Amino acid sequence: MTPKLADYIAAGKALDADEREIAAVALQQVDEAEQAEIDAAWDEAIDRRLDELVSGKVKPVSGRETIAIARARSAARHK
């Protein structure tokens, strides 16, 4: 965490509950241009991944297998 971010967080904690809620909602909102950019990036990612699956470039992995892989990688990092 950068010092600047830590300062923002400290200032946010000094707000009353209503102000913190308003600030949290405002921080989560994006403008229409930003949202269009985000949506376009997701569309590209979805198209690319679907093409990879259809072409056989990647093999689908079950949810259980995905969780097992993630847990194994996490455990390896914490050793």
Image: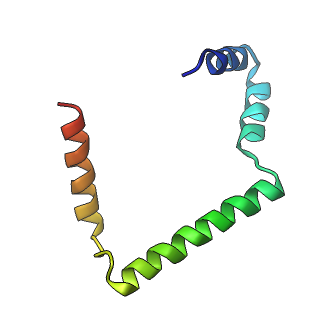
Give the camera-side residue of 2 and 57: 57
Residue at left offset 71%, top offset 35%: 24
Give the camera-side residue of 45 and 22: 45
Residue at left offset 75%, top offset 47%: 29
Q: Residue furthest bottom?
A: 54
Q: Is residue 22 left or right of residue 78?
A: right
Residue 32, x across and y down, in percent: 82, 58
Q: How many marks?
A: 0
Task: Tell me which corner region of the image, top left, top right, bottom left or bottom right, holds residue 77.
Answer: top left
Task: Tell me which corner region of the image, top left, top right, bottom left or bottom right, holds residue 37.
Answer: bottom right
Residue 2, x across and y down, in percent: 58, 20
63 vs 60: above or below = above
79 vs 3: above or below = below
Q: Is residue 22 left or right of residue 3?
A: right
The quadrant of the picture occupied by the C terminus is top left
The quadrant of the picture occupied by the N terminus is top right
Residue at left offset 68%, top offset 17%: 13
Residue 17, x across and y down, in percent: 73, 24
35 vs 50: above or below = above
Residue at left offset 78%, top offset 39%: 26
Give the camera-side residue of 51 and 70: 51
Q: Is residue 73 left or right of residue 16?
A: left
